Every structure is written in C-alpha cells, then in structure tokens.
Image (cartoon, rainbow, N blue to C red):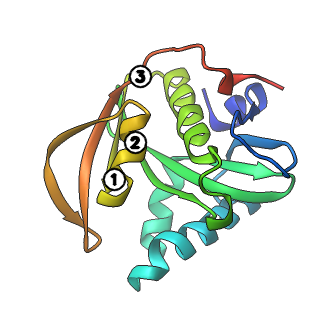
Amino acid sequence: MTVEEWGKKNNYKSDANVENMGEIKIKSVEYGSKDYGKAIDIRYEILRKPLGLIFTQQQLLAERGQYHLVCKEGDRVLGCLVLMPRSDTQVQMRQVAILEDYRGRGLGGSLVRCSEEYAMELGYQEMIVHARESAVGFYEKLGYARVGECFIEVALPHWKLVKKLARTGHVANTKS
C-alpha cells in the first residue's frame, strides 16, 4: 500500500486530550510536500537546533523512501514522525517531535499508535526506536521494551526499544 492510498483510506482523528483546540488529525504526507516541509521545520527546531545540528541534503534525500506522518490542527502541523523500513518485517520509528506548546496532551501517544497501525497495514510486524534517554518512559508506557545497553547517538544517550505490532482495536484508528 502506498502512502497516498493509506492517506486517502485513513485520516485518523486523535484521541488526545485537546482542550481549547480544533479537530486534530493524523495523516501520512508525501516526501517533498508542503506538510513534509513543515515537519522538517519542527524536527529541526526541536531535535537538531538544540544540539547545533542541521539536516544535510544527503540526509533529507535518504528520506525519499520512508513514510512520513504528521499531526495537524487545521493547516497547522503540530507534530511528526518518520518510519524507516529496516527489513520486510521491521520498521524503525524516528524523528518523533511535537511542538512544545502541545506536549502533555496525548498527541505524541496518538501519533505513535497511529504509526503502529500504519506499519501493520504495510505488513510490518515489529517497530524499533532509538529513544533519547529522556523519552524512554514515554515509549515504555506505549508498550515498548528496552533491548541492549545505552549507547550514544547524535551526542546523547539513547536506548533501543522494540515492540511487536498487534491489532488492539484502539479508538485512535477511527476513520473520518
């Protein structure tokens, strides 16, 4: 299934606690699209800039064959993540970012759960993530388990976490 097919079939509504906000939708976006550009901006501000890092052209070109999901309120992108295939059965979730003003409202959890549903529809059976040490608890609450030892990635301590993907019937997959 292509990103376009999934995006047309599944326009997920978030089940996040979003008081004083409009309707929140989670959707796939195409590499190079306007929303992809907004997601790059969010990823840069939250994940790269604080470490003094930039995206290289080579890094962005490598994302062409990856899957991009965004969390939106109207036309505004509030968060994003990238799914990178590792094998026929395993996909890596990476570059998960939510705008600071919208954290703690359940958007990140909804985005991750929707990415799991998407990955299963694409045939993946396992999701891995290299999580910053400060985010390990977030992923553990979503059913991810640590594997191996702590390691350094982009100058920060990280842990590899893994989750076997299985359908749960969670309300986050309500189609509109």
Are the two marked residues, 2 and 1, in contact with CB atoms closer than 8 angstroms? Answer: yes
**Amino acid type at mark 1:** Ala
Lower sequence index among marks 3 and 2 = 2
Q: Which mark is residue 64?
A: none
Kindly identify the residue that appears in the image at 50 percent across and 66 percent down.
Answer: 60
User: Callout 2 environment at 10 Å: few (<14), some (14 to 19), or many (20+)?
Assistant: some
Q: Which mark is residue 165?
A: 3
Kindly identify the residue that appears in the image at 43 percent across and 71 percent down.
Answer: 58
Q: Position of residue 45 (x, y in %)?
A: 56, 76
Depth check, mark 1 against mark 3: the one in front is 1
Q: Position of residue 15 (x, y in %)?
A: 70, 33
Q: Residue 142's image quarter?
A: top left
Q: Is residue 105 above or below residue 173?
A: below
Lower sequence index among marks 1 and 3 = 1
Are the two marked residues, 1 and 3, in contact with CB atoms closer than 8 angstroms? Answer: no
Q: Is residue 173 above or below residue 142?
A: above
Helix, strand or loop at label 3? It is: loop
Kindly identify the residue that appears in the image at 39 percent across and 81 percent down.
Answer: 51
Q: Which residue is mark 1?
A: 131
Horizontal side of residue 83 vs 118, given as left or right: left
Lower sequence index among marks 2 and 1 = 1
The residues tagged by marks 1 and 3 sit, at their Cα atoms, a distance apart of: 18 Å
Q: Which mark is residue 139?
A: 2
Q: Position of residue 124 (x, y in %)?
A: 42, 25
- Please say whether residue 55 is visible from this viewpoint: no
In the rendered image, the quadrant that contains the C terminus is: top right
Kindly identify the residue that appears in the image at 46 percent across and 21 percent down.
Answer: 123
**Amino acid type at mark 2:** Tyr
Residue nearest the observer in this picture, 72 or 138: 138
Q: Residue furthest bottom?
A: 52
The residues tagged by marks 2 and 1 sit, at their Cα atoms, a distance apart of: 8 Å
User: Callout 1 environment at 10 Å: few (<14), some (14 to 19), or many (20+)?
Assistant: many
